[in-house]
Image (spheres, helix red, strand yellow):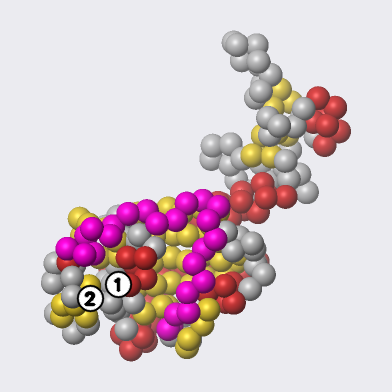
Amino acid sequence: AVVSTQSGHYGRDTNYILSSIQVKMKLGDVFPNETVTTTQGSLSIHDYFAEGWGIFFTHPADYTPVCTTELSMVEKMAPEFAKRNVKLIALSCNSVADHTGWSEDIKAYGKLDTVSFPIIEDPSRDLAVKFGMLDPDEKDAAGLPLTARAVFIVGPDKKLKLSILYPATTGRNFDELIRVIDSLQLTAYKKVATPANWQQGSECMVLPSVKGDEATKLFPGMRIEQVPSGKEYMRFAPQPE
């Protein structure tokens, strides 16, 4: 069944939507290759991300205060994501016409010339249900759950590398997403992990799977932090180039 909402859009029956709220994707799953309608026309998500990395992030609704600050910040940080070969795409449960009008507010608030990334329309919440992106505690005027603040980071292999789900009432820290991208890209190609609060250029940790001679060859500057157990697993090294 479908029900009309006060915003004039149509959505799934409330009970159906509530019963569908669950985490749909696991790390390592291939990210769904949906064909979507956006502010930049119809596109395939995989084709849009092409051979690089992608961030797919969702918003509860257009013309809402926290979302406006978020999209403004994403546009300001777009050059930093581009440096890392990351393409951005957003989703909100409104129409393209709404997105287009809302973009003017986003530009005015952030003193921006443009919103350069596409925003997907999802007034029926079909994609939100499919991706498990709904917040059952935050509802619109019709009693339908709002889209949560989901973030999905997709690698060049089109597999899900990271997902974070924020409640609708908490805005995201996009500096943290830059940090996460730096870690994901580094650890995808080097035999290291990144410790708590790691930042680009700081020490990394040598993977436990790297043993003996291989460790000293790959990481000549490796140091071992001594711990009471006597086990030499706290191995730090300068960030590899």
Residue at image x 86%, y 33%?
217
Give the image location of residue 194, x and y in percent.
61, 40
Spot occupied by residue 126 in the image (x, y as percentages of width and height): 33, 72
Three-letter amino acid code of the residue under disc 2: Gly
Prevailing SS of the magenta stretch = loop
User: Eyeballing the image, is 201 above or below 84?
Assistant: above
| Region in magenta | 15-38
Say which residue label 1 marks: 125
Taking the spot 19% from the left edge, 77% from the top edge, the residue there is 2
Q: What element carries label 2?
A: strand
Label 1 crowd (10 A; few <14 / some 14-19 / many >=20): many
Camera-nearest residue between 117 and 107: 117
Tell me the element at label 1.
Answer: loop
- Which tag, 2 or 1, sits closer to the chain's start? 2
Give me the C-alpha separation between circle 2 and circle 1: 6 Å
Indicate which disc residue 11 carries. Answer: 2
